[in-house]
Structure formats: C-alpha cells, structure tokens
Image: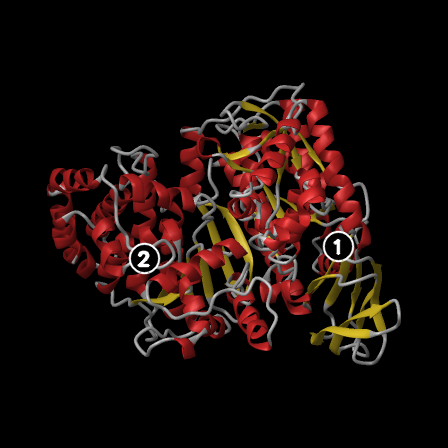
C-alpha cells in the first residue's frame, strides 16, 4: 500500500471512514492530476500500519512495512513537503488492543498488548505499543502552526442552507462542572528556560525516605523554551466526581463525562478510570479484589469491565443495584446500551461538548429520551470555554446560522507545542513524595509534593514556534482585518509566560492596538458576541484550545468540523493540508458494513485538494497545477450549490455519489477554463462522458446500497474488497481509469 517515490503531493492512508472514502476519491485525484503532470503518492500512517512497522522482526518479509510516519516526519521539515493529511485514529488502549487482535487474526504474528507487563520483554513490547497510542501522528507531522478557518464557499452554503440547531431555554439545567481546586490549572508552574538552564533535564520522583527514581532522563530543554509542570490530586478528583454524581441526581439531569482519552493518552484514561470507580464505588468497595482477579481495569471503561464480570452473578447484581440508585446516564448509543462511561475513546470532548451545545444543551438517556445534562470536565484549564458558551446561549438563545460570522483559528502547535498532555512526561505518582524537574545545571526548576495516584505532567513550547505563531497571527489579522484575540489567561502560569513573548512582539510591530489578550472565558464571551452580530473573529490559541475551538465553532456555524479549511504552514516552507475531524467516523463505518452506505462528507478533502494544488503552483511554479486547483475550488462550490453532499440514510446519495459529482464539476470547470488550452482539450471529452453517463453511474451507485458490505477488516481492510465496495460503478471507473 505504501509508496516511497518522491511525488508532488503525498496523500495519507489513514483509518475508518476517511480511508474508505479515499478508495473512491483518490483514483479520481490521480487521474485528473496526471493530466497536468502532477504525481500523487501515498504514505500509510494508519493505526494498523504503525503497529506493523513497530514489529518487523515478528513478521514475514511480505508483511513488513516501512515506518511511513517517521519518513513523513522528516519530509515536513523540508521546503518540498506537500502533504494532504486525513484524520487518523488516535488510539485508546481498547482501540489499540482491538487493532492488534484483528491483525493477529489476519496472520500477523504480533505480540499481544501487555496490560500489566512483568518481564523486561513484556515491558519492551509495552513501550513500543505505547508509542503508538494517542496523538502519535500529529505531533510528528505538525512542524508548523495552524491556520484553520471555514472556506468561503462552505460558509456561504451554511448561511443559505442552515443546519438544525436545538432551542435553548433560559431555565435549562445543563451546566459544566469542574474541580474547585487541586486540578491541573491550580497546580501549574511554568518558566522560560535561560541559557544557563538549557540542556537535558531529568524528571525525578523523590520518595518520603529520600530515595530518588528517575521518571524521565534526558528531557531536552532549549533556551527560550517554556517548560510547565503541574498535577491533579487523585483524592480531590475522587471527591469531586462523587459529588458531581450526587449533584446530578439532585438536579434530575444526566451525568456525562467529557474527556480526551485518545489524545491525552496517559492522564485522561486515568481520570476516566476514576469516574468509573466513582460511579460503581459500592461495587469496587465490596468486590474490588474479585474484579482485579478478573483483570478489570477501570481505565478501560465500563464496557470492558462488564465483559469481564458478566459471569459473576453477585457482581452483576451489585452493579444493577448501584445503577438503579444513580442518576440517568448520558448515552453514546441508547439502542445498544453504550453509556458515556463504556469506552474512553467513545466520548471525545471536542466533538461531544459541541454536540450537546448544538442540541440546545440536550443529551440522550438510556431510554432514548432527550434531557439536560451535567457536563463533567474535571480540569478547569479549558472547561470555562464550554461553561461560558452554555451560559451565553441560555441568555441569548441558539446561534442564528444564517447571519452568524466566523471564528477562525491560529493555533500554536509546531514542534509538539503543548502536546496533548505530554505523554512522555505524564506520570501517576507511585507513592507519596515529590516529583521534580532537575535541570542540567543541577537547579530544581519545578517541584510538587504529591500523593500516591496523583497525575503529574509536564510539557514544553519552544521559542521558534512561538515567534512563528505570533507572526502568523499578525499576518492573518492583516489579511482579514478581523477582530483578533490571544486566548491567554494571565492568571495561569503557562499563559503568563506566553504573554511575555506576545506583548513585546506586538509592540515591536506597532500592532498592539489590533489585538486583545483575554482569558478563555472572556475570549469565549467576546467571540460569541462578535459572531452573533455577524462579524468575524480570529482566535489565537495554544494547541489544546486549537483542537477544541476548531470543532466547537465550526459545529455551531457549519454543522460539522469536517468542512473546515485547515492549513499548516510548515516552518521550513512546505505545506500540510489537513482535511477535518473524524470523530464520527466509527459510526460511518458501521453503517457502511451493515447497509453499504457511507455518509462521510469529503468536503474537507475537496478543500484541502484545492489548497494543495494551489500551493504546488505557487511554490513550484507549476501553472497547470494552479489551473487544477482553481477548477477544484469551482467543483467544491458546485457540490455545495447543488446540494450534492452525502445523505445520512441508506438508499439516498452517499459519499460515492458526491465523488462522482465532484469529478464531473471538476472536469467541466477544466474544460471551460481558458488558461490552459491543453487541459481544456483533455477534459472536454471526460466532462462530456461524465454528463452523458449520469443516469447509468447514479443507478450503479444506488444499486450497491442496502446489503451488508464486506471490507475485510476494520483497522486493516482488504485493499481489493475496499475498492470493490467503494467503486461500484463500472461506468464511472471506465471514464476515470
């Protein structure tokens, strides 16, 4: 599947619905691009490929794969990079285990994931697998800062064809609940590294008896880097969660936990596990040892727990008794009994919170009934964004999509800035003691007294990405004239250090009066006020807020974040074009397998393709690529203007239909343009064939829907079966091929 040539554009092989869509769309891209002498290659960064590449010694020669992620990681550090990056799985432990088991069933002799490694070999295997978990891809590829906004065509369509929005009531009981203290926000310390402090630091645990354990050796800290450290008290977390459950019951609302266990792959699964334990506290008190003997790990969620104890009648009876006393639970899938606490990766905050807000503060309980919900977000660093959004809509009513402006984002993410909980530097305290950062010169930079089970983490943001981020923000404001806000909290240690970079840079450029610096709560209120008035705002944020806001505002404004234009201006001059979120992709795959209908919307891919081709024209002077890019933008507008995006229901047009229409509009635009006669002549007969073949093509696509579809695997589908399912129109294939 992998291609190691040096093509003009690299298209990533990923997972789930976006990868299924690629089986239909990529042949079209390659066919059209080849007419302009533009080559399109692939790199496989799927979860399955990353697993396979990590264990070459366990596999046959035919099964082995190159480490495409590492290769792409080097490419994005060069001016030649032009990568279209689709959303990939950021695996939780249950997803990782499921992918390993599927690969094993396909004949890959991979080692099992060691849940509790004991031997050195098991620990080594676990370390290799842990490197694949969570946000293993994005930090490697994002060698630049993010410029994310809605494409004009998409915004125009959303205003003319508004998506559904739930009504907000002033007396809604929906709210956000967070820890009052002793969380990551409260305990954070930050400092900017001086020349005298630079070098390889160590993270150490000092036990009460003075014994020192090195948790991480050789942690590089360059001059100008902002280095943070903080922790969340496990005792305070447990008390908060227990109180939140009782508070929810008293309010008569649903309990819902909103985390990011996929990206923050060390801290958030632990927090998730605390919630499972709090929900089933009486069961753990009585049967804790029995459940441990059955291999129960609350961090893996209620689904795994129930599967392990299902044959123990006493434990199941105790669970039923506790559940009967608890408040209603927010459901991921009411029909299948999948609760908010079932699987850590099922509820991802940046998708789940906007969904609740878009629905007027409503969630669905176990009986499929809508109701208000207590949105539990333990840490306060960014919970205030959602709290303020809910308060705003309670006071002002739902957003009017037809008149609303837009919130674009300039995000600080280059070189692993604020890397989603900093997995390599996040630890669960092994005992009571102190966790500290010791610099290469012997100085202790940060130290926290911790209790056993506390969650301690550190992260860094380097100087060059910060300076590039500020420059990008000034450039975006200059080009748009929009309101521009740095979402930075002067009362938070990390943000206070960033402000020390931002303020002098704006003053030196003579642009301080064009920007505001506001804490997230105040920035949220100001941005909502701005877009409600029909104006635009630029949110200039760190990496985690970039992730959250580029789902929140697009879901409110456009109905989805998958249609956002996401450009990463790589610091060495290359381009990375991201294609939108994949949070609902698992449900899309399930529907395809059951009904052969793929409702994934490739609008993000359409937008990224146009930008990638335009970038190729600008950087490489390839005029034909520019003609292709301009025509791709016309095709994108055609999809929107003519309502050719996928429907959600089987028997109606799906993703494959939208690809036909995109190809047709693209060919027609190329045939009609006057900038390149050769391209016009080449695409004129193609456009004619696509138009004349409309009835046959749509009939062939429609005929495929309904029966179950076999793609040969979830994490590692068969290339042949995937192509058969996603390219069912012989008429279309003959024209394209």
Which quadrant of the figure contains the C terminus? bottom left
Residue with the mark numbered 2: 717
Q: Which one is in front, 212 or 376?
A: 212
Q: Position of residue 621 (x, y in %)?
A: 36, 68
Q: Residue at image x 70%, y 74%?
A: 219
Is residue 595 something that shows in the picture? yes
Q: Quadrant of residue 647?
A: top left
Residue 242 marker: none
- Whether residue 522 is visible to the viewer of this picture, yes or no, is no
Relative to 52, 457 lies left or right: right
Residue picked out by circle 1? 495
Looking at the image, residue 552 lies above or below residue 542: above
| SS at mark 2 in the image | loop
Residue, x 32% and y 50% (percent of image)?
21
Left or right position of 93 against 504: left
Q: Nearer the viewer, residue 48 or 643?
A: 48
Q: In this picture, is 664 found above or below 22?
A: above
What whole-number distance in Å separates the C-alpha atoms at marks 2 and 1?
A: 44 Å
As helix, strand or loop, the secondary structure at mark 1 comes to helix
Q: Which one is in front, 721 or 173?
A: 721
* Residue 549 screen position, x and y as percent: 59, 45
Label 2 or label 1, whichever comes before in sequence order? 1
Which residue appears farthest toward the front when viewing the image?
Answer: 313
Q: Position of residue 109 (x, y in %)?
A: 39, 71
Which mark is nearer the camera, 2 or 1? Answer: 2
Q: How many marks?
A: 2
């Amino acid at each position: 599947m992998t291609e190691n040539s040096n093509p003009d554009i690299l298209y990533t092989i990923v997972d789930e619905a976006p990868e299924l869509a690629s089986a239909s769309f990529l042949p079209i891209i390659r066919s059209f691009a080849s007419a302009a002498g533009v080559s399109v290659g692939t790199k496989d960064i799927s979860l399955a490929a990353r697993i396979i590449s990590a264990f070459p010694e366990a596999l046959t020669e035919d099964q082995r794969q190159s480490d495409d992620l590492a290769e792409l990681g080097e490419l994005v550090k060069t001016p030649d990079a032009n990568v279209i990056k689709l959303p990939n799985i950021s695996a939780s432990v249950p997803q990782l285990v499921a992918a390993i088991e599927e690969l094993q069933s396909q004949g890959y002799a991979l080692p099992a994931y060691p849940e509790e490694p004991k031997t050195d070999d098991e620990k080594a295997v676990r370390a290799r697998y842990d490197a694949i978990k969570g946000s293993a891809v994005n930090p490697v590829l994002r060698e630049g800062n993010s410029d994310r906004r809605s494409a004009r065509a998409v915004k125009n369509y959303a205003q003319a064809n508004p998506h559904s929005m739930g009504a907000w009531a002033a007396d809604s009981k929906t709210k956000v609940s967070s820890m009052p203290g002793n969380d990551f926000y409260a305990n954070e310390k930050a400092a900017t590294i001086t020349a005298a402090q630079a070098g390889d630091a160590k993270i150490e645990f000092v036990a009460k008896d003075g014994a020192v354990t090195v948790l991480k050796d050789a942690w590089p800290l360059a001059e100008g880097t902002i280095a943070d450290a903080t922790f969340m008290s496990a005792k305070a977390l447990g008390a908060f969660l227990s109180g939140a459950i009782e508070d929810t019951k008293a309010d008569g609302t649903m309990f819902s936990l909103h985390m990011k266990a996929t990206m923050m792959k060390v801290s958030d699964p632990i927090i998730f596990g605390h919630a499972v334990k709090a929900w089933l506290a009486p069961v753990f008190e009585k049967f804790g040892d029995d459940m441990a003997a059955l291999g129960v790990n609350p961090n893996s969620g209620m689904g795994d727990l129930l599967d392990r104890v299902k044959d123990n009648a006493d434990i199941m009876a105790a669970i039923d008794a506790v559940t009967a006393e608890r408040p209603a639970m927010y459901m991921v899938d009411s029909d299948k009994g999948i609760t908010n606490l079932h699987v850590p990766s099922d509820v991802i905050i940046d998708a789940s919170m906007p969904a609740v807000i878009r629905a007027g503060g409503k969630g669905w309980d176990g009986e499929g009934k809508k109701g208000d919900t207590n949105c539990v977000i333990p840490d306060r660093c960014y919970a205030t964004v959602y709290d303020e959004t809910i308060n705003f809509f309670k006071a002002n009513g739902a957003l009017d999509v037809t008149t609303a402006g837009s919130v674009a984002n300039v995000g600080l993410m280059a070189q692993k800035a604020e890397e989603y909980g900093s997995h390599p530097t996040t630890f669960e305290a092994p005992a009571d003691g102190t966790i500290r950062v010791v610099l290469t010169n012997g100085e202790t930079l940060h130290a926290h007294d911790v209790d056993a089970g506390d969650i301690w983490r550190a992260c860094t943001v380097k100087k060059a990405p910060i300076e590039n981020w500020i420059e990008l923000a000034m450039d975006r404001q200059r080009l748009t004239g929009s309101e521009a806000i740095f979402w930075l909290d002067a009362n938070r240690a990390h943000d206070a250090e960033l402000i020390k970079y931002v303020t002098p840079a704006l003053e030196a450029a003579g642009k301080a009066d064009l920007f505001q610096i506001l804490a997230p709560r105040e920035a949220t209120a100001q941005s909502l006020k701005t877009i409600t008035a029909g104006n635009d705002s630029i949110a200039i944020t760190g990496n985690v807020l970039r992730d959250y806001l580029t789902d929140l505002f697009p879901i409110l404004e456009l109905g989805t974040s998958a249609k956002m234009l996401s450009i990463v201006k790589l610091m060495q001059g290359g381009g990375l074009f991201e294609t939108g979120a994949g949070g609902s992709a698992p449900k899309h795959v399930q529907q395809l397998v059951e009904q052969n209908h793929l409702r994934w919307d490739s609008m993000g891919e359409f937008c990224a393709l146009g930008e990638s081709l335009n970038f190729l024209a600008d950087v490489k002077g390839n005029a034909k690529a520019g003609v292709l890019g301009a025509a791709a933008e016309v095709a994108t507008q055609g999809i929107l203007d003519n309502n050719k995006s996928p429907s959600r229901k089987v028997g109606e047009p799906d993703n494959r239909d939208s690809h036909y229409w995109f190809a047709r509009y693209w060919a027609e635009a190329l045939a009609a343009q006057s900038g390149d006669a050769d391209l016009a002549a080449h695409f004129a007969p193609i456009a004619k064939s696509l138009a004349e073949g409309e009835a046959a093509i749509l009939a062939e696509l429609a005929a495929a829907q309904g029966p179950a579809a076999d793609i040969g695997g979830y994490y590692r589908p068969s290339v042949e079966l995937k192509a058969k399912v996603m390219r069912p129109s012989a008429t279309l294939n003959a024209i394209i091929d």
